[in-house]
Image (tube, grey):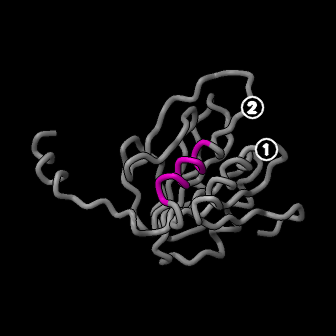
């Protein structure tokens, strides 16, 4: 770690590009695929996918999504800096936020409480990126994402929500 410390000290974090948070329920895989089937591969945006999945199974989202875009798709890692034209996927059993220009992963506590992973991420994204935050809510019947989209709008960002008929 000491070898890269001098390099990292002078590194300017690329926070001048849009960060697009995409929230979906467990049944939102088809909607996510359709979105990336029609999204340009050179938008200069970073994409973060927060999907409600079972913490007991490894997510195959990165592998499946890579068939629907030419952008680099990978699981998010703790302290990772987002890059334009890349897609980051929430790993199973984790919660994700953005702090000081970096993705922050924590273990998701097992409980019977509703999962508000989308709200958590959207709220941190709004605080961190302000007008450069875009929230996309796909599928689902719960309320996860509603507080987060309010935070994004209040910070000057933009929100897109899938309509009940499956259109974005």
Residue at image point 52% right, 42% down: 96
Q: Which of 62 and 105 is in front in this view?
A: 105
Say which element carries label 2: loop
Residue at image point 67% right, 33% down: 54
Q: Which residue lies furthest to the top in this view?
A: 111
Tell me residue 149's x, y (percent). 68, 55
Q: What stretch is highlighted in magenta?
A: 120-129
Q: Is residue 35 left or right of residue 165?
A: left
Question: Dot 1 corresponds to which residue?
Answer: 143
Tell me residue 70's x, y (percent). 50, 71
Q: Which residue lies furthest to the right in this view?
A: 165
Is tag 1's residue or tag 2's residue first in the polypeptide sequence?
A: 2
Count of labels in the image: 2
* Mark 2, other Cα within 10 Å: few <14 / some 14–19 / many ≥20: few
* Mark 1, other Cα within 10 Å: few <14 / some 14–19 / many ≥20: few
Say which element carries label 1: loop
Q: In this view, does 67 lie to the left or right of 42?
A: right
> Is the residue 7 above or below the residue 118 in the image?
below
Tell me residue 34's x, y (percent). 71, 67
Question: Dot 2 corresponds to which residue?
Answer: 114
Tell me residue 121's x, y (percent). 57, 46
Q: Do the residues labelled 1 and 2 touch (CB within 8 Å)?
A: yes
């Amino acid at each position: 770690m000491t070898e890269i410390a001098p390099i990292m000290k002078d590194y300017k974090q690329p926070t001048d590009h849009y960060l697009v948070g995409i929230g979906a329920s467990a049944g939102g895989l088809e909607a996510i695929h359709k979105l990336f089937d029609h999204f340009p591969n050179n938008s200069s945006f970073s994409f973060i996918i927060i999907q409600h999945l079972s913490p007991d199974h490894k997510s195959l989202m990165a592998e499946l999504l890579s068939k629907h875009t030419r952008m680099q798709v990978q699981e998010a890692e703790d302290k990772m800096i987002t890059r334009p034209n890349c897609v980051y996927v929430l790993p199973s059993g984790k919660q994700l936020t953005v702090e000081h220009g970096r993705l922050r992963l924590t273990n998701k506590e097992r409980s019977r409480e509703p999962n508000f992973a989308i709200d958590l991420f959207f709220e941190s994204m709004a605080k961190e990126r302000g007008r450069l935050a875009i929230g996309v809510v796909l599928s689902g019947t719960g309320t996860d994402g509603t507080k987060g989209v309010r935070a994004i709008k209040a910070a000057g960002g933009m929100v897109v929500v899938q309509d009940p008929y499956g259109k974005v």
